[in-house]
């Protein structure tokens, strides 16, 4: 197997594992830099002159697809959870505004 291919696949696996760990710990600060680093590795892999068999062997050896599937699933779940939290906050804000407008007008409109 090509040394560069093996090194890049190992780095790809390590970065993917780092991304998974950050998502598990809800540490969203370093995700962008890790994602850009991961994209650079993927671009480097495209430029390598290796056969399809070598590439597939490296993917199997480092279990890249398993880690990618785990990362994709985790990102989808985190995205769904964050969307639900944002929707809840938005709904609470709307209810609070409506309630305060309604209560405020009825308190001050009555004669004492």
Image (cartoon, rainbow, N blue to C red):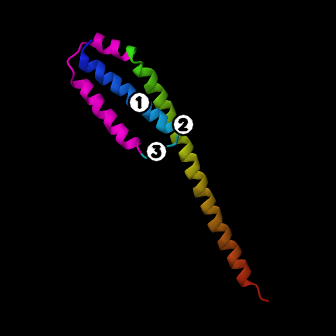
Q: Percent x, y for residue 79?
A: 51, 41
Q: Percent x, y for residue 91?
A: 61, 57
Numbered range of the magenta stretch = 30-59
Q: CA distance from mark 1 to mark 2?
A: 16 Å
Residue 25: say if magenta. Answer: no
Report the predominant secondary structure element of the magenta stretch: helix
Q: Earlier in the sequence, mark 1 or mark 2?
A: 1
Name the residue furthest bottom: 112
Q: In the drawing, does residue 111 fall left or right of residue 104?
A: right
* In this view, the mark in front (1 or 2): 1
Q: In the drawing, does residue 27 fall left or right of residue 107?
A: left
Callout count: 3
Q: Percent x, y for residue 93?
A: 60, 62
Q: Determine which of the numbered discs, if any, sits on residue 16 in the image.
A: 1
Q: Quadrant of residue 96?
A: bottom right
Q: Quadrant of residue 17?
A: top left
Local packing at callout 2 (Cα closer than 10 Å; few below 14, some 14-19, many 20+) is few
Q: CA distance from mark 1 to mark 3?
A: 14 Å
In the figure, 69 relative to 36: above or below? above
SS at circle 2: helix
Q: Residue at x 40, y 21 (%)?
A: 64
Name the residue furthest right: 112
Which quadrant is the N terminus positioned in?
top left
Q: Determine which of the numbered discs, if any, sits on residue 5 in the image.
A: none
The residue that disc 3 covers is 28
The residue that disc 2 covers is 77
SS at circle 1: helix
Q: Earlier in the sequence, mark 1 or mark 3?
A: 1
Q: CA distance from mark 3 to mark 2?
A: 14 Å
Q: Quadrant of residue 7?
A: top left
Foreground residue among 53 and 34: 34
């Amino acid at each position: 197997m090509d040394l560069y291919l093996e090194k890049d696949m190992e780095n790809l696996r390590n970065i993917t594992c780092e991304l998974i760990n950050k998502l598990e710990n809800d540490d969203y600060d370093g995700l962008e830099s890790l994602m850009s680093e991961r994209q650079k590795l993927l671009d480097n892999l495209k430029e390598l002159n290796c056969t399809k068999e070598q590439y597939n062997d490296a993917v199997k050896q480092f279990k890249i697809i398993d880690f990618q599937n785990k990362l994709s699933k985790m990102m989808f779940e985190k995205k769904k959870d964050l969307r639900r939290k944002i929707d809840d906050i938005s709904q609470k804000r709307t209810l609070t505004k409506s309630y305060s407008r309604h209560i405020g007008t009825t308190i001050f409109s009555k004669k004492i």
